Image (tube, rainbow, N blue to C red):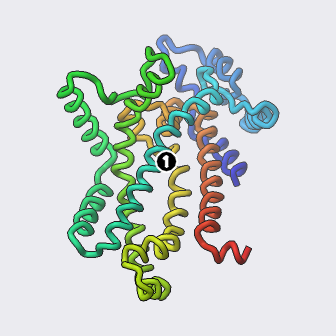
Amino acid sequence: MIVVATNLTYFLANWFLDPRANYVLLRPPPAPEQIDRALAQYDLSPSTPVLVRWQQWIGNIVLHWDWGRSPVGESVNDEIAFRVGVSAQLVLLSAILSVAIGIALAVYTAARQYRFADRFTQVLSVVAMNIPVPVASLVVVLLAIALNRSLGGTLFFVAGSRSPTVTGFWPLVLDRLQHLALPTVALTLISYAGYHLLQRSLLLDEVNADYVRTARAKGLTRSEAIRRHGLRTSLIPVATSIAFTIPALFTGAVLTETIFAWEGMGRYFITTISENDVHGVVAVAAFGALMTAVGAILADLAVAVLDPRVRVSG
């Protein structure tokens, strides 16, 4: 399916995108023959039949793992390699925090159903789910700017993923954390709520199950029964959701990366479309398909780990 999706994207990208637009906007614009010659060296010239271009493109991938070049000669391999690492720093940390906070809140509030803590955190989560990404990001930026001003220095950076002038291992680690803090907070703020509300609902369903009532009859408190017995079973749908959500975040955090000027996969995807970069678009689509396949595998593994019936039947 990854191969089919990737090749289908290649033909669709060649159909809708026109790499010649990158040269037509130059002043003075080059002659059509010059544009064709420039694009031909990257296998992007529309004057070459698309099947011929596809054959050359797929051959370079199979033989050399070369995903081609942009209309201006930039290596797609180099761009993807750099941007995957940038996105991974942002996406994985925010995903871990979102899951940890969401599940912890769910366990805490399910044990205190209809009490003040439960109601209050539900309201917060519903509000967080409905906050648009630009609004959440801009609020975080404004608060960070106010904090930096009150401290008389720069505790958090509001743009970029690193400072080019910083050297040394520990200074680099500190610099990355200062750049990473704000976009991570913004992504976590809008992501944790879904896990909280879903996990809470599943836990409340499990609390009334026979095996949980039996555990409580043996002397366990409601909180202990939820943690020891209800949580594991109710985690299965949440774990499946997490496995499929994390791959999507690699290419889906477009607004967050744009607001905080992070050169990740999401922003690269938008850039390749706007610049008519056929090879870049296809590479991003292939990466997304691969991550979806990885998510499916992780979801199966999570179900096998959490559900002993699956391991027994296997």
Depth check: give the residue in front, 69 or 287.
287
> Circle 1 — which element?
helix
Residue farthest to the front, as pictured: 219
Residue farthest to the top, as pictured: 28
Image quarter in which the N terminus is found: bottom right
Depth check: give the residue in front, 156 or 289.
156
In the figure, is residue 57 to the left or right of 194? right
* Residue 249 pos. (x, y %): 49, 47
Q: Residue at x 58, y 68 (%)?
A: 306
Q: Residue at x 38, y 70 (%)?
A: 200
Residue at the spot of label 1: 249
* Residue 43 pos. (x, y %): 70, 27
Rendering quarter of residue 154: top left
* Residue 18 pos. (x, y %): 57, 32
Residue farthest to the right, as pictured: 63
In the figure, is residue 213 to the left or right of 112? right
Image quarter in which the C terminus is found: bottom right
* Residue 267 pos. (x, y %): 47, 35
Q: Is residue 132 above or below residue 220?
A: above
Label 1 sits on what residue type?
Leu
Rendering quarter of residue 53: top right
Depth check: give the residue in front, 72 or 226.
226
Number of residues whose C-alpha sits closer than 10 Å to that of mark 1, classed few (under 14), some (14–19) or many (20 or more): many
